[in-house]
Every structure is written in C-alpha cells, then in structure tokens.
Amino acid sequence: MRKESNPLTPAEIAEILKISKYTVYEMVKRGELPAYRVGKKIRVDSHDLQEYIDKGKGNEPVFDEQLGIPSASLLESPLLAVETTQEPGLIICGQDLSLDILGRYLEHHPAGVRAYRQNLGSFAGLLALYQDRADLAAIHLWDSDSNSYNIPYVRRLLPGIPAVIIHLGCRMQGFYVARGNPKNIQQWEDLIQPGIRFVNREAGSGTRVLIDEQFRVLGINRQMVKGYENLEFSHLAVASAVSRGIVDVSVGNEKASMQVRDIDFIPLRRERYELVIKKEDINRAPFQVVLEILKSSAFKTELEGLGDYDLSETGKIVAEV
C-alpha cells in the first residue's frame, strides 16, 4: 500500500525546487518525475517528489530559463498538451484591435508564445506592468504641459523601473456625433452648451485623460458637462450610445466610428498609441519576437487594411525611460 501523499501542482513543485514550471513539465515528460492528470491538470504526489529529491535529480536544466519559454519537445507531450496551453505566455494590456492581431501573430510565430489579452485602459495597464501582472501595456496618454504622449506618464507610473516605449501607430481621436451632426458639435466648448448630453470614459483610460486634460487647459468646468459622470468602458460602447440616441456626443478613436452605424466622426487630435515593456525584458526571446512582428510587412499590411492607422513608425523604439 502506498503511503499517504498530497498532490502538488507544477507551480508548487517549481517553487519547492526553485526552477521554472516548464522545467517541471519537461521532467514529467521525460519520466523522471511521476505524474498523473486530474481532468485537464497535471498533479504529482508529494512522496514521488521527495523520492526524486532524494535521488538527487533536481539539478538538470532542460532549457534556457532566461528565455521563459518551453522547449519544442515539451509541446509535443500528449500528457502535457492541455496543461501547457494554460500556462502564461505574454500578457498584453490594452483595448485596440491591433493588439488582438499582434497576439495572433505571436502565437503563430515559430518562436512565439501564447498571448493573453487584458482589456485594460492605459493607467490600469501601466499599473499591471508595475505590479508584474502584465508583460506589455499599450497606452495613449496625452500630457498637456509638454504636448507629448506617453513618456511623461511612464516616468511617473513606473517609478524606478527602466522601461522601453515601442511605437504601434498613430490614430485620430475625436467626437462621435449623430449622422449629419444635428447639434453642430465642433469643439470642446460645445459640450457645455444647454441640452448637450455626453457620455464619458472610465478614469485612467487614455481617452478620459485626453478629455480631462482638455477641460483643464480650456478652463471648462466638468460639472457643467451633462453626463460627465456617466461612464462606458470602450470606444465602441460610447459610439453605440451616440448611435442609439442615448447621448449626443462622446469621444473616441476614428476606427470605432467606422464600425457603428449612423454616427459621424469629428477629428480633434492625432494621438500616439505605443507599447511599454520593462527594459530588463527587451532581449528576452518572446519580446524579440514581438519586435520582429511589429516591424514585419505582413503585420503592417493587415493593419493598413483596417484603416485609421499611421504606421510609418511602427516597431520603432521611441524612448527608453
């Protein structure tokens, strides 16, 4: 009879042995560490782990852990096929369609990894990066004092963490109004006109920062904007509110106006949409794959087909902060 044992996850074993979870998977694949499946999960009995440790087999690296990706042979293991697809690859924060396309290219690249998308605004994405809950954060944050995008915010919100800013593309931000612009909304000051109904974006999103910065620069009292406190959480959501006649105006990028019926787009500002990563990660293999994808003609051609992107600087490292 086997003595009583507790099941351990790959993550728990990795913590005990001070190795990568992918090293644990490789040990299981090679038969060095007995394992079994519970549904879609891999488990190892604690007494089997102790026997492995007693035999002194815990010091055989099977791949370069600096790369943070599994070896090709690991992905071929039938036992681990489901489990490994649930392991983290790169977590990409942001709300633009270009990030979904980037994630697809990353997963299909010969040296790529799985892409996990987090639908977070600019501030939340930078916070996730700062707290090690994300690997890349896409941002579009306008600083009115310097009339520049992104760099001032990265310096403030990633204190003490050297970072690299990589250009994705330029987009146009503007007003969404009903088809024909019946309320003749043309400028920011029009938002405080009597009878104008507005819907806002959530605090911390790049669009909300643009709105609040413009109000501050122009001396607009936000309490006079009817609907300033009403929030939606995406460009499409605020555009849809205009299309359905719930509000008269909202702010977002031009692309969403192309996807929603019966609205017009009033351009206001050309913005820079950029990726932020930690400088310490820039030479790791998955991030080099990201840079390769961003510079590739295939990626740029697909984005060009969507419209509303200036891709002349896509893939360029624009700053190290």
Image (cartoon, grey):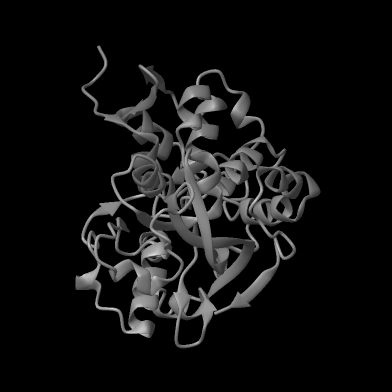
Q: Is residue 259 above or below residue 182?
A: above
Q: Residue at x 40, y 36 (%)?
A: 10
Asked whether residue 57 is in view, the answer is: no
Does residue 17 appear left or right of residue 77 in this picture? left
In which quadrant is the C terminus drawn? bottom right
Asked whether residue 29 is in view, the answer is: yes
Q: Is residue 219 above or below residue 36?
A: below
**Nearer the observer, 249 or 317:** 249
**Nearer the observer, 213 or 298:** 213
Q: Is residue 30 above or below residue 169?
A: above
**Nearer the observer, 230 or 66:** 230
Does residue 303 appear left or right of residue 146 in this picture? right
Residue 234 % position (x, y)? 39, 49
Does residue 102 appear left or right of residue 313 in this picture? left
Residue 295 % position (x, y)? 75, 56
Residue 231 % position (x, y)? 26, 54
**Nearer the observer, 178 or 294:** 178
Q: Residue at x 46, y 48 (%)?
A: 19
Does residue 68 appear left or right of residue 236 in this picture? right
Which residue lies most toward the top here? 1
Q: Is residue 259 above or below residue 3?
A: below
Residue 13 % position (x, y)? 37, 40
Q: Image quadrant of residue 244?
A: top left
Q: Residue at x 77, y 44 (%)?
A: 298
In which quadrant is the N terminus drawn? top left
Q: Residue at x 27, y 16 (%)?
A: 2
